[in-house]
Image: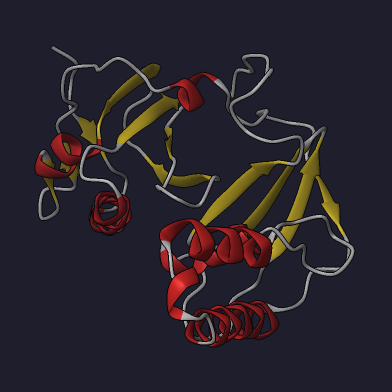
Amino acid sequence: MTPPLHFADAREAADLAAFLARLIHYDRAAAVRLQAGGGALAVFGRPASFDVLAIRTAALLDEAPLDVTVSAGQLLEGIEESAGKAMVPAPVTGPPWAGVLPPRGGWREAAGLPDAAGLRGAVAAAVAEFRARDGALPAERRTRAERDRIGHEIWSRTIGSTGLPLRAVHAAQSLGFLPPHEVPVALLAAGAWLRLRTPYGSVAVRTAGLGTGLSVTAV
């Protein structure tokens, strides 16, 4: 049995629990990959329908290395917020994305990202556009396929010249990484990867597309 994780601050346990609950909201069968070592934990998940990787980090008291893919729901059940610890459930067979993670280093800051208010405004405008276009569809075209087409068109747009797809910003807001108050935001780039980082977590996307023809990259 894998030893429990002991967080450096009990609030880290609560923050991780909130992140896992949001992942499960989108996919009750969600899995997460845990990587720990040297007193730090990184939790990777892929929220359903966003086609991005979400990353939540936490400081640990433990130094031992760990690299395992587990059920997000079982990990959530094993978190003891008051005690600041989490029981690590048995490993599961990892989904394909779990073997294709962003690089550990080599990140550089990229220019052109709006501030947090600007990012939230872009998401709000996209949601309003989707609702308007959906509402304007005639009855014979009001199908799941047509709605998916409109959604894909809107959320695949990039933020200015950054190359960051709007769906990554939408995911960040939906996962609580972009709260309704001012927070510092940064756009980082490493190879084919882009990463939107805030104090609450990160969303990473491979600009060449996830899940096809990718090499396995250690984090």
In this rendering, would 45 be left or right of 146?
Answer: left
Pick the residue in front: 142 or 201: 142
What residue is drawn where x is 52% and y is 71%?
Answer: 178
Residue 51 occupies quadrant: top right
Q: Residue 25's x, y, as percent?
A: 25, 56
Q: Residue 139's x, y, as percent?
A: 43, 78
Q: Residue furthest front?
A: 140
Can residue 198 be seen here?
no
Total number of numbered labels? Answer: 0
Q: How is the image coloured?
A: secondary structure
Can residue 50 be seen here?
yes
Residue 207 occupies quadrant: top right
Q: Residue 41's x, y, as percent?
A: 41, 35
Residue 41, compared with residue 88, is above or below; it is: below
Residue 88 occupies quadrant: top left
Residue 27, compared with residue 125, is above or below; it is: above
Residue 100, compared with residue 166, is above or below; it is: above
In this rendering, would 50 be left or right of 74?
Answer: right
Where, quadrant-wise, is the N terminus in this rendering? top left
What residue is drawn where x is 69% and y is 36%?
Answer: 209
Pick the residue in front: 142 or 191: 142
Where, quadrant-wise, is the C terminus in this rendering? top right
